[in-house]
Image: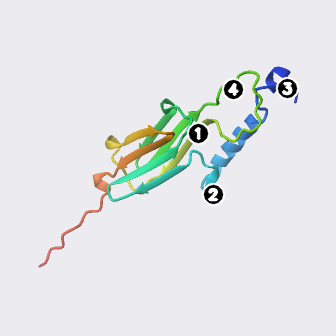
Amino acid sequence: MFWPESRMFGMDPFAELRRLQREMNRLFEGYGEAECAWPAINLWSNRDEVVVSAEAPGVDPKDLKVTVQNDIFTIEGERKPEDLGENAVTHRAEREFGRFSRSIRLPYEVDNSKVTARYRNGVLTVTLPRSEVSKPKQIAVATE
């Protein structure tokens, strides 16, 4: 394939191949090793809430979209590439750029009206309070 000189410098000819590889990895997410999933997500819960934290350094918070439907949590966004200038030559490119989307199943349904999200130091932390309907209820046993 012919690459005009203006595209050789400052343009990564393998960017499209890496994008295709990321898309293929997303197709098989959950069937192999977790390291191909981006952004990395931690999830923990207690009796009253679920907390999800996602690494998103370099992502502008306005480019993040967080949704919850029933017990499915989804984070979508875009990390835009750095502007290196027209004469820059890339020697190593390990940080991924582009659009991303991850969905995970929560351990129980949450109250969507009370969800809060905070972005700090490149980490998005979302607190999802458990819905009252999904909390276990103790049933009194009557005697005769």
Q: What's the coloring here?
A: rainbow
- The mark lying in front, picked from 4 and 3, is 4
- On screen, 21 above or below 87? below
User: Closer to the N terminus: mark 2 or mark 1?
Assistant: 2
Mark linked to residue 84: 4
Secondary structure beneath label 3: loop
- The Cα atoms of the two marked residues, 4 and 2, are separated by 36 Å
Q: Which of the two discs, 4 and 1, sits closer to the camera?
A: 4
Residue annotated with mark 3 = 3
Q: Are marks 4 and 3 in contact (CB under 8 Å)?
A: no
Q: Residue at x 15, y 74 (%)?
A: 142
Horizontal and vertical percent position of residue 33: 64, 57
Q: Residue at x 44, y 40 (%)?
A: 67
Q: Which residue is mark 2?
A: 31
What's the amino acid at mark 3? Trp
Which residue in the structure is indicated by mark 1?
100
Which of the 4 image quadrants contains residue 138?
bottom left
Tell me which numbered mark, 4 or 1, is placed earlier along the sequence. Answer: 4
The CA span between labels 4 and 3 is 19 Å
| Sooner in the amino-acid sequence: mark 4 or mark 2 | 2
The mark closer to the camera, 2 or 1, is: 1
Kind of residue indicated by mark 4: Leu
Q: Which is closer to the viewer, label 4 or label 2?
A: 4
Query: Given the current orientation, which residue lies at the most extreme right position?
Result: 2
- Residue 94 located left or right of residue 41: right
> Closer to the N terminus: mark 3 or mark 2?
3
Q: Earlier in the sequence, mark 1 or mark 3?
A: 3
